[in-house]
Amino acid sequence: LNRAELWAFYLKYIDNPKYEKTFLELIESEEAFKVATQALISISTNEQERYNLFARQKVENDYNHDMAMSEEIGRQQGREEGIQQGVLQGIFQTAKRMLKRGKTVSEVVENTGLTEQQIISLKEEN
């Protein structure tokens, strides 16, 4: 077993009497497993401590998950807003070019979907 599989096995079966001998050997040969076992024994002796530990871990995991989701949602919204701004900017650029080419306000409105007031404002800017 690789190290990750060994830890998974340890965490899954540590309280299974069938593997007691295996774990005793592992604990004797690996300091990390010895420390983990001592922590588990300490935690499991006090039900309230165990409950508090799991509650803190759940809160931390939920917080980390929520933060990651918020960041992803923020990135997606930012991308969508950027795309919308880019599209709108492109429409305004098209409208400006049409006006420079002598198209009427109504022609620009019809082709771009902008309002007549927006086209008039663009025309006044130039």
Image (cartoon, rainbow, N blue to C red):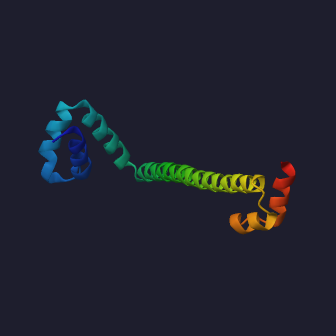
* Residue under the point 49% across and 52% down: 65
- Quick one: 2 or 112, which is closer to the camera? 112
Residue 95 image position (x, y, % from top left): 73, 57
- Quick one: 114 or 33, which is closer to the camera? 114
Instruction: From the viewer's perspective, tell me whether residue 64 is left or right of residue 88.
Output: left
Quadrant occupied by the N terminus: top left
Residue 12 image position (x, y, % from top left): 25, 52
Residue 116 image position (x, y, % from top left): 82, 65
Residue 28 image position (x, y, % from top left): 18, 33
Residue situated furthest front in the rendering? 102
Instruction: From the viewer's perspective, tell me whether residue 14 is left or right of residue 86.
Output: left
* Residue under the point 66% across and 53% down: 90
Q: How many marks?
A: 0
Instruction: From the viewer's perspective, tell me whether residue 78 is left or right of residue 126.
Output: left
* Residue under the point 19% across and 53% down: 16
- Quick one: 23 or 67, which is closer to the camera? 67
- Quick one: 78 or 36, which is closer to the camera? 78
Quadrant hosting residue 33? top left
